[in-house]
């Protein structure tokens, strides 16, 4: 829901698109995809095939930890991209008299 709201809010307003809203939308979308792929889908597969949780619990934990690691990597990359863009855009103007 948040991703949809941010996407509509950023694309429907007049004028220049906000980089902050694009970044927030990217982070919200990343979080949503990771939760669906690494948390919900493995649980649905287990429940549909009548697997015993005690037998496959470690695979569930591996799936969740892999999702968290992927999400952490993508968030760090997004934040690093922001800091690189900020350092390139800041200029120092020195006037001599």
Image: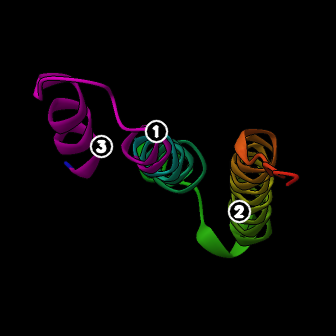
| Residue 17 lies in quadrant | top left
Cα–Cα gap, marks 3 and 2 = 19 Å
Cα–Cα gap, marks 2 and 1 = 25 Å
Front disc: 2 or 1: 1
Q: Which residues are magenta?
A: 2-24
What residue is rendered at 73% in x and 48% in y?
90
Give the numbered dot on residue 3: 3
What residue is rendered at 30% in x and 25% in y?
16
Please state which of residues 44 and 14 is positioned toward the viewer in this rendering: 14
Question: Helix or strand or loop: what does disc 2 sit on?
Answer: helix
Q: Position of residue 58 (x, y in %)?
A: 79, 70
**Circle 1 sits on which residue?**
19
Q: Position of residue 80 (x, y in %)?
A: 80, 52
Q: Earlier in the sequence, mark 2 or mark 1?
A: 1
Front disc: 3 or 2: 3
**Circle 2 sits on which residue?**
68
Q: Position of residue 70 (x, y in %)?
A: 76, 50
* Colour mode of the rendering: rainbow
What residue is rendered at 54% in x and 44% in y?
30
Determine if the magenta segment contains residue 57. no
What residue is rendered at 71% in x and 55% in y?
79
Question: Helix or strand or loop: what does disc 1 sit on?
Answer: helix
Please state which of residues 46 and 42 is positioned toward the viewer in this rendering: 42
Q: Earlier in the sequence, mark 3 or mark 2?
A: 3
Determine if the magenta segment contains residue 7. yes
Question: Helix or strand or loop: what does disc 3 sit on?
Answer: helix
């Amino acid at each position: 829901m948040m991703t949809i709201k941010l996407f509509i809010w950023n694309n429907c307003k007049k004028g220049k698109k906000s980089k902050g809203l694009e970044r927030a939308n990217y982070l919200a979308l990343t979080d949503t995809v990771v939760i669906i792929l690494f948390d919900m889908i493995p649980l649905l597969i287990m429940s549909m095939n009548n697997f015993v949780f005690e037998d496959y619990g470690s695979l569930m934990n591996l799936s969740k930890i892999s999702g968290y690691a992927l999400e952490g990597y993508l968030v760090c990359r997004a934040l690093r991209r922001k800091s690189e863009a900020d350092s390139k855009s800041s200029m120092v103007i020195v006037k001599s008299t």
